[in-house]
Image (cartoon, helix red, strand yellow):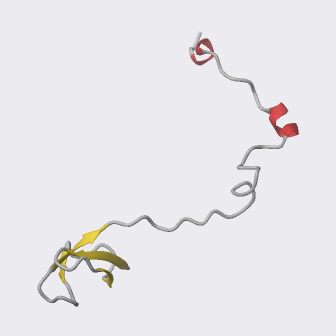
Amino acid sequence: MRYAYKCKQCDLRFDEEFPLGQAPEKVACGVCMGGQARRVFTVPPVHYRGTGWSGAAHGVPDMDEREKLPGPLEFGDLLEE
């Protein structure tokens, strides 16, 4: 698994590979040789597939489908009688 690191001394960002869950918090920087690089957390890429994730639809059902949906709930609807 790839883990991202950033050197405090030279600000270099780089990736290192370690087995899943075994990445150390700090590693030596391979460029400046003097700095300690700390692990940084990055956002994983997300790829939405299928219909409704792009264009004008944005996952909203068609008008015919919306008419079949129940209306909003009232507070009393949630209480057991």
**Residue 64 percent location from the top left of the image:** 88, 38
Q: Is residue 57 left or right of residue 74?
A: right
Q: Position of residue 13 (x, y in %)?
A: 31, 78
- The answer to whether residue 9 is left or right of residue 72 is left
Residue 53: which quarter of the image? bottom right
Q: Nearer the viewer, residue 58 or 67?
A: 58
- Name the residue at 75% across, 56% down: 55
Looking at the picture, tell me which residue is in the foreground, 39 or 23.
39
Image quadrant holding the C terminus, namely: top right
In the image, 17: left or right of 61? left
Q: Is residue 69 above or below residue 27?
A: above
Task: Report the residue that reaches farthest toward the top.
Answer: 81
Q: Which residue is found at the position 20% from the left and 72% from the top? A: 25
How many numbered callouts? 0
Q: Is residue 22 visible?
A: no
Residue 74 horizontal/vertical position (percent): 63, 16
Q: Is residue 73 visible?
A: yes
Which quadrant of the figure contains the N terminus?
Answer: bottom left
Q: Where 78 falls versus 11 (above or below)?
A: above
Question: Who is closer to the viewer here, 54 or 3?
Answer: 54
